Image: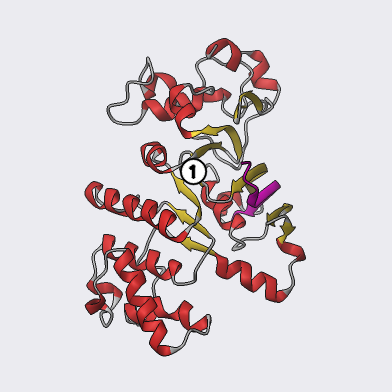
Amino acid sequence: MIKSPILSAVDLHKTFRTSSKSHTGRFLTALDGIFLDLLSGETLGIAGESGCGKSTLAKVIAGLLTPDAGKVLYKGTELAQLGQNDLTQFRRKTQMIFQDPFSSLNPRMRVGDSISEPLIIAGIPDTLRRIERDRIMAAVGLPSEVVNRFPDEFSGGQRQRIGIARALAAFPEILIADEPVSSLDISIQAQIINILMQMKRDFTLSMMIVSHNLLVLRHICDRIIIMYLGVIVECGPASEIFRRCRHPYTEALIAAIPGSHAATASKDELLHDDLPSALSIPPGCRFHPRCRHAVDLCRHEVPKLIEYASGHAAACHLSSQLYS
């Protein structure tokens, strides 16, 4: 059975005007022609180094930022064409989990009230609201007796559980998590990942997970998209990305995973220098200044995203030669 997209991005572009003294009036390119689909019931991973545009993409997809060009479709309808009631419904059905759980919670609001707020907005009666709140808290591993505590009384992992519970209290169809475990200890990361996987099954969610940690995405995602300086350089099934990546940048990211034996060289050998500034995008293939395989063609011609296997595509002039 072919699943239909619940969210789609069509040729998204987004820039930001810089405010620093040395770059006043210049524009930073965050997204430059992004196409993607989030299928119903799917978990889609968005990966790349800091500064590649993945968090901006998540916020545009969620309707928190307006694209400069292109459109976001919810069940086939453009967000810009939704009426006020339908747009409110979309915002309730699409919830975000942020990297810093403390800053996303009201420090003056008790956690029970914070989790209950979406239930109040949904018009659920008092008695049922308490039952539903406790059910959701139990689902993310929070005991009901903590409802009267404030966010600063919890650890980082517990705050992230509160953030997940608050998102689930809106009865979403789509959950977008922006670096949900990057600020947590390794042991806590595993707990939050397991909670997200359980929530997907229990609440029938479609999920988009933004992370620089490919190992996390491999564990939780059906498909992975690799971004670099505002564009998609590779996308495909998670298992296929790890079994047979088709872009030198993806190869370098996999090589950077501790204990990885997927690459024949180290990350330092595969990835030269740091990520270039999005204020000055390199011509041709954006990755060519850091790629050990780059040829003259890479420096002058932008590679197209070409599908090499079912659902697995890469934007690299040399992909067929390097990964045949």
177 to the left or right of 70 = left
- Judging depth in this view, the residue of 227 and 293 nearest the camera is 227
Q: Return the x and y of residue 176 as percentages of the image width and height.
A: 50, 56
Q: Give the magenta range.
A: 1-18
Which residue bears the numbered disc 1? 45
Q: Residue furthest front?
A: 1
- Please tell me which residue is depicted at 41% across the width and 68% down the height of the picture: 104
Callout 1: SS:
strand
Indicate yes or no whether the magenta region holds residue 42: no
Residue 271 visible to an observer of this rendering = no
- Please tell me which residue is depicted at 40% across the width and 28% down the height of the picture: 254
Q: Which of the 4 image quadrants contains residue 314?
A: top right
Q: How many tags in the picture?
A: 1
- Please tell me which residue is depicted at 37% across the width and 14% down the height of the picture: 264
Q: Return the x and y of residue 158 as percentages of the image width and height.
A: 27, 64
Amino acid type at mark 1: Gly
- Please tell me which residue is depicted at 60% across the width and 36% down the height of the picture: 232
Residue 7 visible to an observer of this rendering = yes
- Judging depth in this view, the residue of 197 and 276 nearest the camera is 197
